Image (cartoon, coloured by chain):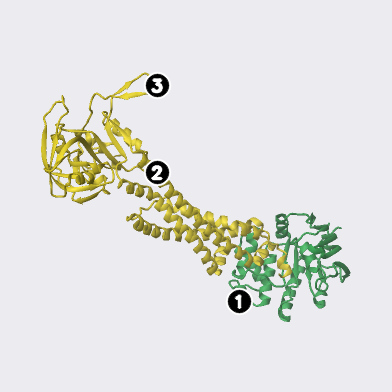
Chain colours: A yellow, B green
Amino acid sequence: MLLRILTKSLARRKSRIALAVVAVLMGAAVATALMTVSLDVTEKVSLEFRKYGANLMVVPKSDTIDVGFPGVQLGSVTEQRYINESELWKIKAIFWRNNVLGFTPFLYQVVEASDGNGTQDVVLAGTYFNREVAILEPYAPQDPTLFRTGIQRINPWWRVDGQWIGDPNDTASAMVGKAVAEKLGVGIGDELTLTYRPLVGAEGNTTSRDVTVVGIITTGGVEDDQVFVNLPVAQELTARPGKVHTVQVSALCTKCPVETFAREIEAKIPSVEGKTVKQLVDAEMSTLGMVEGLMLMVTLVALFASALGVMTTMTSSVIERRKEIGLMKAVGAERRKIVALFLSEAAIIGAIGGAAGFVAGLVLAQVIGISVFSTPIGLHALVLPAVMGLAVAVALLASLLPVRRAMGVEPAIVLRGE
Amino acid sequence: MAGDIIEVEGVRKLYGGGTRALDGVDLAIKEGSWTTIVGPSGSGKTTLLNIIGCLDSPSEGRVVIDGTEVGHLGQDALTRFRKDHIGLVFQQYHLVPYLTALENVMMAQYFHSVVDEGGATAALERVGLGHRLEHLPAQLSGGEQQRVCIARALINEPRILLADEPTGNLDQANGRNVLELIDVLHRDGHTVIMVTHNPEIAGMGDRTIEIIDGKVSSDTRRREHPHAKEAA
């Protein structure tokens, strides 16, 4: 009988109920959109951050000397340490391998750069620009055995005049930082001679290599003072075959701290240690926190507006149906049955508005995804029950005052003919 | 007193602003009797009916219905008592406009206990509306609507039927039909209390109580209610 009363009562007041449903719909749509985006945005924002460079630095583990004070140790200064290039594939063979977006090794050496007119000491950096690395023992059998990586992949924001060194076997090209290019007065297409002189007393011979400048790099950082060549060029020039100094890793980490990556890499390659780029990680976390906070605020405001809409509708419904409520009480309806009637109406309004708002919210989420992040937003199964629950809860909460008013209607009004 | 189903003693009803709607009313009503209440507008008749009908509580005094003192019951307790003991018929019918005749009767069943569509249909057939079950109130005449109200008032088998000007909005023919129906219910043993302005209708009761300025001004007994049940 309650169902009959409910359906007929709602059908009779279609336009008023429609207003309440629209109010819930709008709140639910905003909640759905922002909840969907929020669940996806962590990854999206992290991906955006990854465009600004690596957030993890892998360096050789240094020997330490205990100097006798608790917690105070000195690193070894007597021995230059390296990472074996042959072990780098292991970075992509850890448990969180799918979150390793890229890595690139660096071998640094101060060399002389001359263009025929002058000579300048510069930092030579041998690296991967954009090449495939063979994963010798994938973590899982189904994992790919090749991984394309390099600085072009993990630092897409670097400004390059000219072009990147595309061929990993190219031993005749170099990219120079903007400051180096200005000091030497070289431009794209110019030739440079790179000369490595071992320190006095050190092993090795002086070696030189002629390279052609194919690109000029501007980062605003230390890279502007460096000359970049393919890693084998630097290894050969400095007589350090198969060695690198550091590896920059770009890790997408939304559900785990970057430190987890560092520990995993250390376990996989015992001779290295991972150091997080704290400022970048902190900025990332802080930005994510702000974005999520903003979304929560907007959702709360939208739901509050929905609640006001439902409350207005339910209040006018109670006023309009005062005589009907009085009649129901007069013929035997206890207050709990009046409460059940109005809260059921509110729940139906909430459920219809919630379902419609969910659909509208998914569309809105895609609009946000494409316009803000340039990619569609993925759907999450949890959002539907969460939004339905929220919509019904908001409708019920917004009905509490009107229902209280309904409870106060005196049955005697029907006999008074008011 | 033995056989009294309703006892009202020293009942006063004061409203905000000092309005005194009832001012010391005493009366006792035998079970199975038909009592009519008359009086000018604003005299307190409807207030008295509200209090006897458990729709309102007295400010002072004692009201005992079927052995239960109801004067100080809370709202829900009054509602529970009312739905078990009292059927109400209103001058303006007061049917839920979006429910059919049958559903209006079933609604009273729902609020009382369980819905029984067969019982509701039988109640409407009893008041001559077996052919109008699925009609909305707006599709029924005034007399038909009032008969739906009577069916609704009786569906939970109360012993007391209160009627506030039940023919006030009806033409003569429909009014007569409704009164005949009430007479049948009275003969069946229901205690009937009816507020009316019409002296002729008032004369149909076993007894007529006149209320003026919130007090019983006259109490006329025409006959010893032949259908009344005496207490053992």
Dot 3 falls on which chain? A
Label drawn at residue A21: none
**Residue lying farthest to the front in this orientation:** A117
The answer to which image quadrant residue B23 occupies is bottom right
Label drawn at residue B139: 1
Say which amino acid is labelled 2. Answer: Met
Q: Which residue is mark 3?
A: A70
Q: Foreground residue, B75 or A44?
A: A44
Q: Write the residue at 18% across / 43% down.
A: A132
Q: Nearer the viewer, mark 3 or mark 1?
A: 3
Q: Foreground residue, A28 or B185?
A: A28
Q: Is residue A367 rendered to the left or right of residue A385?
A: left
Vertical arrangement, residue A305 with respect to residue A66, above or below: below
Q: Is residue B194 rendered to the left or right of residue A143?
A: right
What's the distance in space between the residues labelled 3 and 2, CA to CA? 33 Å
Q: Is residue B114 visible?
A: no
Q: Badge 3: how crowded within 10 Å, few (<14), some, or many (20+)?
A: few
Share a chain, discs 3 and 2? yes
Say which amino acid is labelled 3. Answer: Pro
Q: Is residue A286 rendered to the left or right of residue A413?
A: left
Quadrant housing the C terminus of chain A: bottom right
Dot 2 falls on which chain? A
Q: Is residue A24 visible?
A: yes
Q: Badge 1: how crowded within 10 Å, few (<14), some, or many (20+)?
A: some
Q: Which residue is mark 2?
A: A285
Element on which disc 2 rests: helix
Q: Write the residue at 23% across / 25% down.
A: A79
What's the distance in space between the residues labelled 3 and 1, CA to CA? 96 Å
Q: Write the residue at 75% across / 69% down.
A: B163
Q: Badge 2: how crowded within 10 Å, few (<14), some, or many (20+)?
A: some
What's the distance in space between the residues labelled 1 and 2, CA to CA? 68 Å
